[in-house]
Image (tube, coloured by chain):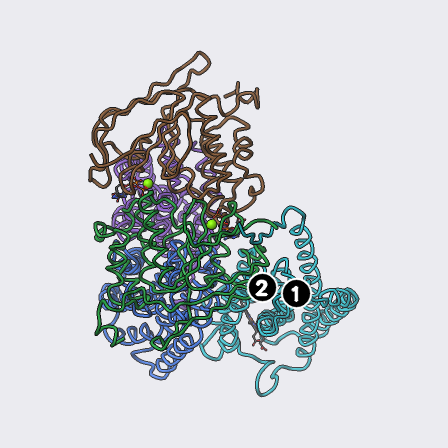
Chain colours: A purple, B blue, C cyan, D green, E brown
Amino acid sequence: MFLAILRRDLLLSIRGGGGMFQSLIFFALAILTFSLALGPDLALLAKVAAPILWAAAMLSTLLSLDRIFQADAEDGSLDIDWQATDLPVLLVAAKAVSHWLTTGLPLIAATPVLALLLNLPAEGLVPLLLSLACGTPALSLIGTFAAAVTLPLRRANILMSVLTAPLFTPVLIFGVSAAESGGHDGSRFLSSILFLSAFSLLSMVSLPFASVWAIKSNLD
Amino acid sequence: MFLAILRRDLLLSIRGGGGMFQSLIFFALAILTFSLALGPDLALLAKVAAPILWAAAMLSTLLSLDRIFQADAEDGSLDIDWQATDLPVLLVAAKAVSHWLTTGLPLIAATPVLALLLNLPAEGLVPLLLSLACGTPALSLIGTFAAAVTLPLRRANILMSVLTAPLFTPVLIFGVSAAESGGHDGSRFLSSILFLSAFSLLSMVSLPFASVWAIKSNLD
Amino acid sequence: MTSVVPPAPSRSNSIYQMANPERFDRLAQGVIPWIGGIAALLAVTGLYLGLFVSPEDYQQGATVRIMYVHVPAAWMALFCYTTMTISSVAGFVWKHPLADVAAKVTAPIGATFTLLALITGSLWGKPMWGTWWAWDARLTSVLVLFFMYLGYIALWQAIDDKARAARLGAIVCVAGFVNIPIIKFSVDWWNSLHQPASVIRADGPSMPGSMLTPLLVMGLAYSALYVWLLLIAMRGEIADRRLERLTKDEPGNAKVSGLRKL
Amino acid sequence: MTARSMTPGILSSNSIIPCAMTVDQLAGGRAGTLVFAGISFTLAPGEAIVLRGANGCGKSTLLRTLAGLLRPFDGQINFSPQTTEGNLEIPAQMTVLVGHTNGLKATMTVRESINYWMRLYEAAEGADKQAIDRLRLGDLLSRRTSTLSAGQKRRLGLSRLLICNRPIWLMDEPTSSLDTATSTMVLDMMDTHLDAGGAIVAATHEPLELARAEKFVLEAA
Amino acid sequence: MTARSMTPGILSSNSIIPCAMTVDQLAGGRAGTLVFAGISFTLAPGEAIVLRGANGCGKSTLLRTLAGLLRPFDGQINFSPQTTEGNLEIPAQMTVLVGHTNGLKATMTVRESINYWMRLYEAAEGADKQAIDRLRLGDLLSRRTSTLSAGQKRRLGLSRLLICNRPIWLMDEPTSSLDTATSTMVLDMMDTHLDAGGAIVAATHEPLELARAEKFVLEAA
Ligand code: HEM
Ligand SMILES: Nc1ncnc2c1ncn2[C@@H]1O[C@H](COP(=O)(O)OP(=O)(O)OP(=O)(O)O)[C@@H](O)[C@H]1O
Ligand SMILES: Nc1ncnc2c1ncn2[C@@H]1O[C@H](COP(=O)(O)OP(=O)(O)OP(=O)(O)O)[C@@H](O)[C@H]1O
Ligand SMILES: [Mg+2]
Ligand SMILES: [Mg+2]
């Protein structure tokens, strides 16, 4: 069941300009646009590279949220999947995992290239990647929860964004802090990374159940 | 006909977390995220304020494109509207105008506040607003065209972005150039603004027809 | 128009209603080896002149030799897009199916040249400007050109109906053409890291002959290479469509309805 | 326009310009694949055609082609409107299609949808009232279309026919998901349209007792 | 699981666990508004109920409530599966609903949709082949679902019933937009399901000649 949904969602995400490329393209575009707008000042770029990458990652996650449940709710496949399983939390988990695999993971994979374009100092790359790896799972889980809550409001991105942004902010702040302190400030780096991991773990054990409950209240 | 479609689209855009708020929220969020990520360096912020505002405007336009035609195509109302009119170019024009009114205009309206947050120097505001006013119509028209071309590929944001971004780039480059040179470099400002206006005008007289033609090829 | 011509089995393959692709195919088959030979000959000459005969630059030293690969690649990047635009317009105005095919298969070739210009440019940029990449108008606009090629290719791939893909590709290509002058003149309009034109300019080239000659020879070599690849790719595309038509017309797939009164 | 607004209610929305449709050797299809060919018929004002045929035989494709929403591969569709003195402006579009989808916006109410069509088609005053009465939408006016039942959605979708004032109705499975009473009502509505000089092409799998209709089957030749 | 994969084709997808459904004083509705109340019935294996009623009377709402997709306002729905020795694991879900929408993904092909359902329901091997044969989807396997005609989509939507191996089928207007031949075929399919010990609740506006069905009208009391 879990695997079936995961597999289907992965298929859909690479099919016909599906979600995976969408997030990736948006991530790349956001970074290109900003660096194009900032112009050819290399020192400035190096300074803002890590924050820009984190901000872009967060924005592209935010934008991908309405494909978690909304499309399924509209075409009736959410009904089918919901009715097919005895353990709805598996359905939610599959959705969150597939969201991370099609959004978080590709972003992390694309980061080295984009970091190069942004002139990020070489020693900053590993901390950045680590911070993204620890932080993006939390983003996917929070996003899944927000999508579940806003289910009946079709394409209600406004509410979704307003709900998600406050929860995303701590991740962003600690993510940037970890990425920036990586090279030189060992203890700050460690504490930020620990916070990110704790936040992700906490989301993992609580939010799927909260999401199931939200969907249950929203079925119509 | 033109007015009927315009009015309906405006209604839809303010209804139930519709498109208007969506673009606006995204615009604000993008700017907040980036300034949050950049941290509390006011001088740096002031320097990147105009480019960031332009980049965010472009990104939020890019993201709003799939509501121009895709939703209409899916629920069958594009068929109705297309069949209702003898002059399809009016339909396309109504779509482009309503897109601008619900995306470009609110962004311009929100810019003064966000510019304040970004610590944009006061004398930079008017040039920035002028450059947005001259540039955003081109963005809406190009977007309408791209949406028309990718009509049969449901929610093909990837292709849409890839097709649009190159056409958006000149607007972004000249827009930032105008916004940045505004205070001090009169001739560069003037030439950039002229370019933006020319680009918008050119789009206005050519792209609606190109879009009609694209829709015609795409009807299915 | 109505009753004389039997209904076309499929518009997307209407290319076969004209005898002319077959003629093109035969013609191309004969010409391809010759063009390939010419391209190879020119390339060998150009590389020899460029790498061994021409002088080192007094500022740049031996790295200047990257020029003989970089500059013609950059020219071809622009030239291929222009060719695509012209073919698209031709396909649109004269409904000549070969023009659509030419536009379609030029895109990957042009994308490759663009990528080559980008890579050689960055390789050159590291010693010259101290960075692989900078967000400068010229470099960015070439990157954008690369994306335009990719977008065009993706459009063809995403749409199953060939006739429709040709129509949409054509209009996208023409709309994207505005970027070509921007790339060309980007060095003049913005203060760019990249140097301004020294060969193709209004008042004639401003480069010493010992460098200009190998550069021009390499330019010709690249052009011949393009024509060679183009002809091969066009033949391939035509063969593909023929194959597709054969499989589509298999008995059982051709269920065409008509009206019967009850 | 001015004349119209001065005499509200007199010019009902049924004052259509009768129009004949001649279809000659029409061929068409989807995504480059031929679906039907050699279709010829004439439809005079007051006449109706009922199309039948197996799933996937091309009924919807034919209707969309007649509506101008698909390019014909070959052949001709001609319209000959019968102008009388009073009707000088002839609209270019003579047909209206109600397809499988109803073309409703989920977040608009029934009232708003009807008002939108009134403006879209520049309909004569009173047409909305007539449509609402005829399709018994009165109780549903303030409901969002997303909260309607399947049959209620279809009823709203069909009400557009009465608003648009077009002589030729193209109907794709008009009675699908309608209850028996409403189906009868829709048949009545079609009869009234034929009486007023309109014409109809309808595709259906259901009995559809339209007395004056010629019946055709669309099938593989 | 292992036993199944060792005997492919022997355990056909029809080997359902028969299950009776008892509904007691059920009340339900939409968006907080009561739509139906006081519904009680028992449905034994091999039995069918056909629901009729005017548009908007609440047929779909009732079916969705029975399917567990809407919370009942009041009352009880109980399932009593009839376990035999061979069937020790009883799934918690006894019903499957085919609603107005078919639940298809536009960009997936017919084959991919069927494979997905096979995995989703952990169906016995061969169930896909049977579904494809029964609903004549063989020619359409490589087509994207967005390019199917209305009836073809419905056929694919109904094929899920044969894959999911659930004893109680809840069908909302199963034959809508199907041609006559396919409707008959679907009726056959329902008969087979009843013979195998399944049960059916179907809402419809069409005749639906199901011999063994009790017919109910849902109407305002
Ligand atoms: C990724 C980086 C680069 C890109 C995308 C790029 C792109 C281009 C393009 C598009 C042209 C053709 C211009 C025309 O036809 O007018 C060109 C020409 C040229 N480039 Fe680059 N370039 C890059 C890096 C460099 C570097 C580092 C150098 C050396 C300092 C260089 C030297 C030249 C020269 C000498 C020409 C010939 C100009 C002429 O005579 O027209 N380029 N380049
Ligand atoms: N968008 C599309 N792209 C490609 N092929 C399509 C598309 N829509 C329909 N088809 C195919 O064209 C043929 C005709 O379809 P059409 O929808 O006209 O059938 P129909 O007679 O209306 O069937 P139904 O009774 O099921 O509504 C079918 O084989 C169908 O699969
Ligand atoms: N999502 C919803 N929100 C609020 N009300 C709804 C919703 N869906 C349906 N309704 C209302 O609930 C009532 C019952 O609807 P339901 O869809 O069950 O009717 P039905 O019997 O299936 O009708 P039909 O024959 O038209 O399909 C109707 O009055 C309908 O307008
Ligand atoms: Mg149909
Ligand atoms: Mg219903």
Judging depth in this view, the residue of C83 and E46 nearest the camera is E46
Q: Secondary structure at mark 1?
A: loop
**Quadrant (top left, top right, bottom left, bottom right) of the N terminus of chain C:** bottom right
Q: Are marks 2 and 1 in contact (CB under 8 Å)?
A: yes
Residue B22 locus on image (x, y percent)? 29, 57
Q: Is residue D17 left or right of residue C107?
A: left
Judging depth in this view, the residue of B43 and D205 nearest the camera is D205
Q: How many marks?
A: 2
Please tell me whether residue C56 is drawn above or below residue A185 in the rendered image. Answer: below
Provide the residue designation for mark 2.
D74
Q: Residue at x 36, y 24 (%)?
A: E92
Provide the residue designation for mark 1.
C5
Q: Is residue B125 left or right of residue D221?
A: left
Amino acid type of the residue tagged 1 in the rendering: Val
Judging depth in this view, the residue of B177 and E82 nearest the camera is E82
**Does the image show residue D157?**
yes
**Does the image show residue C132?**
no
Q: Is residue C12 left or right of residue E49?
A: right
Q: Is residue B57 left or right of residue C63?
A: left
The crowd level at tag 2 (other Cα within 10 Å; few <14, some 14-19, many 20+) is many
**In the rendered image, which quarter is residue A86 located in?**
top left
Kindly identify which chain the residue marked by label 2 belongs to.
D
Q: Residue at x 20, y 39 (%)?
A: E32
Mark 2 vs mark 1: tell me if same chain. no
Q: Residue at x 22, y 67 (%)?
A: D9
Residue B52 locus on image (x, y percent)? 33, 64
